[in-house]
């Protein structure tokens, strides 16, 4: 649906106000990261300073939390890439009994409230006597990251044509060569985009993590403790700003990678 | 395939190539190999955990020893029905409904503009304008609202500058939606929920609106429909699957959240907080499990109704 008419002014205002509502609070964080006020959230800031950047840089606990978050997100993303791609390939290339059930099962971890996933994993670890470790966090994260990779890969598989694979086989390539030289290059950008989003999702996750982390601190858990009991407001402000900046990059990257998705070889029909 | 064996090249040497050939000749084996890892992972870890949760909700806790009594009973579910717990459920469901309705109202103009009028660069800008808030950190978004709603924060400052503090105070003195300040009132909780889940409503709504053919609107106008009538009788029914798809997210996410009401809101509990506190300090895992079953059941009914309304085509 598209119109060449000009939009009514009321619609423009409503849409613009909605977008402002979405963006202004985040922009506010950038101002607060430089405030000189330490004890309250005073607005307007009484003065501006960059000293909190240095203070935050020298905090070992934040570096540790960041390292754990990156580790968890990397491993979860790798697992999700493998499982999500396999599942997408199976679901999009063939019809079989239970296909609908499988796509429902992939979506379920993200369709059900996070707290359900969290407490379900927690009670399963309890029943099975599994102690909390980095791996229990990864187990939970990989489970809901699969769906992001799956969605991206399924969309790409649907658009790329099966005759490419047949052509490769006709030219004498075996299955692994076809995978290496035809299938993977075709889906590479979709996987990269899915992987980036999975990384962002895992890096940011807190609800499931609170149930599976035990005593460990990922960066979101560190943030959460600061939110519940603010003790070091300036440092939290800086961490919040850095997190915003860092999550923007994979999203912009994923956007540019999937934007030209229509120009894939073999998509023309 | 089997009938023309002669046309197939002789088997190639090398273990890997033989494997490749075998897989090509037995597509079912390949399918099985592809499906096994994801199905095992999700089936064992995820569905297994959900099952463990369900089982625990049928256990009960011994009031005197505080230990879990591993016997099948419906006692824990009966405990859900005492007024205090029923209040929590009603409160959470009403909040989820209010957030969903408000999200539709706020999301509609954005989705409509993006689908019908935005072009080229503006289209990309709208897309990123929705995706960036969607994907930026959940906790940072809540934190931003803590800054906005704080007593010494920007919102109170704005009201004071506009000489409207009296209006804010009159609003806060209202029963139910008011409170001591915005950050400890239901209004605050509501605003943050709305903010955090809004992009989840915009995206499916926009997808549904993109699919409305423009000539339908022209036809409606040609037949004498006023813009209001066109909206009511043409656009809204066609956008409904998108609205339902979006409401699945806003509803489900609000039902299961325990962090937003904990940080911004009154001290009255939501389902998520009840689950969290029962499994944590109280150690009453059966009751926590039973509480967690409530959103599953509500979402199950919701999804079933949504499927009947054809909402899944808009995802």
Image (cartoon, grey):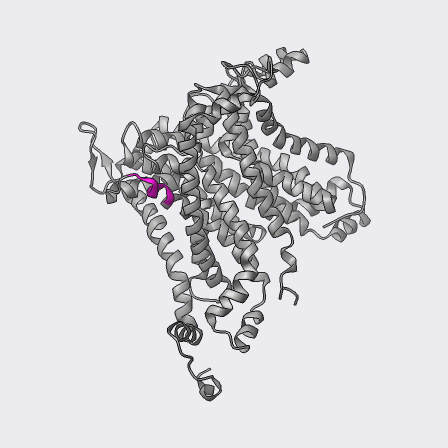
Image coords of residue B57 (percent x, y): 29, 40
Image coords of residue B37 (percent x, y): 38, 58
**Which part of the image, by quadrant, shows the C terminus of chain A?**
bottom right
**Furthest residue toward bottom:** B6
Q: Residue at x 44, y 52 (%)?
A: A106
Give above or below for B237 relative to B146: below
In the shown orientation, is residue A262 left or right of residue B100? right
Image coords of residue A181 (percent x, y): 53, 66
- Residue A15 quadrant: top right
Whether residue A133 appears in magenta in the rendering, the answer is: yes
Q: Residue at x 40, y 79 (%)?
A: B13
Give above or below for A76 relative to A163: above
- Magenta residues, as a range? A132-138
- Residue B267 quadrant: top left
- Residue B281 quadrant: top left
Q: Residue at x 34, y 33 (%)?
A: A216
Secondary structure mostly seen in the magenta stretch:
helix
Q: Does residue B144 appear anywhere in the picture?
A: yes
Image coords of residue B268 (percent x, y): 42, 23
Q: Nearer the viewer, residue A45 or B288?
A: A45
């Amino acid at each position: 649906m598209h119109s060449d008419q000009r939009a009514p002014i009321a619609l423009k205002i409503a849409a613009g106000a909605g977008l402002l509502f979405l963006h202004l609070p985040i922009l506010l964080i950038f101002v607060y990261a430089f405030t000189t006020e330490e004890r309250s959230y005073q607005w307007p800031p009484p003065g501006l300073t960059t000293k909190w950047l240095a203070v935050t840089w020298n905090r070992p606990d934040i570096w540790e939390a960041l390292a754990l978050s990156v580790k968890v997100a990397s491993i979860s993303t790798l697992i999700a890439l493998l499982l999500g791609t396999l599942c997408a390939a199976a679901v999009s290339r063939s019809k079989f009994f239970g296909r609908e059930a499988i796509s429902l099962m992939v979506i379920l971890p993200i369709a059900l409230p996070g707290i359900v996933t969290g407490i379900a994993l927690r009670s399963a670890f309890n029943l099975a006597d599994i102690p909390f470790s980095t791996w229990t966090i990864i187990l939970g994260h990989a489970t809901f990251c699969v769906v992001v990779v799956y969605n991206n890969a399924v969309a790409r598989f649907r658009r790329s044509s099966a005759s490419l694979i047949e052509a490769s086989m006709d030219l004498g390539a075996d299955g692994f060569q076809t995978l290496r030289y035809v299938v993977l290059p075709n889906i590479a950008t979709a996987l990269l985009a899915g992987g980036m989003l999975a990384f962002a999702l895992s890096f940011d996750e807190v609800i499931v993590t609170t149930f599976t982390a035990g005593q460990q601190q990922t960066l979101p858990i560190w943030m959460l403790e600061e939110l519940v009991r603010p003790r070091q407001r300036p440092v939290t402000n800086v961490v919040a700003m850095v997190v915003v900046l860092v999550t923007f990059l994979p999203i912009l990257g994923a956007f540019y990678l999937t934007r030209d998705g229509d120009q894939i070889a073999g998509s023309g029909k | 395939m089997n009938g023309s064996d002669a046309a197939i090249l002789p088997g190639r040497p090398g273990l890997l190539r033989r494997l490749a050939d075998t897989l090509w000749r037995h597509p079912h084996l390949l399918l099985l190999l592809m499906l096994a890892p994801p199905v095992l992972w999700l089936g064992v870890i995820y569905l297994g955990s959900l099952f463990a949760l369900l089982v625990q909700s049928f256990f009960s806790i011994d009031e005197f020893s505080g230990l879990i009594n591993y016997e099948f009973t419906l006692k824990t579910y009966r405990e859900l029905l005492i007024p205090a717990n029923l209040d929590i459920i009603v409160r959470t469901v009403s909040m989820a409904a209010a957030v969903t309705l408000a999200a539709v109202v706020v999301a509609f103009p954005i989705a409509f503009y993006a689908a019908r009028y935005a072009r080229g660069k503006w289209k990309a800008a709208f897309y990123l304008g929705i995706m960036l808030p969607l994907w930026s950190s959940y906790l940072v978004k809540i934190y931003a609202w803590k800054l906005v709603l704080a007593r010494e924060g920007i919102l109170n400052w704005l009201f004071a500058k506009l000489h409207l503090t009296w209006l804010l105070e009159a609003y806060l003195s209202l029963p139910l939606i008011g409170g001591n300040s915005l950050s400890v009132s239901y209004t605050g909780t509501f605003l943050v929920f709305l903010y955090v889940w809004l992009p989840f409503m915009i995206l499916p709504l926009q997808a549904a609106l993109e699919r409305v053919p423009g000539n339908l609107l022209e036809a409606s106008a040609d037949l004498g429909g006023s813009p209001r009538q066109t909206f009511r009788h043409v656009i809204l029914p066609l956008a409904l699957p998108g609205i339902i798809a979006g409401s699945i997210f806003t509803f489900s996410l609000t039902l299961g959240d325990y962090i937003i009401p904990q940080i911004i809101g009154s001290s009255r509990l939501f389902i998520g907080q009840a689950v969290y506190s029962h499994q944590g300090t109280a150690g009453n895992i059966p009751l926590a499990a039973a509480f967690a079953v409530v959103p599953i059941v509500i979402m199950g009914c919701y999804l079933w109704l949504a499927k009947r309304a054809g909402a899944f085509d808009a995802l």
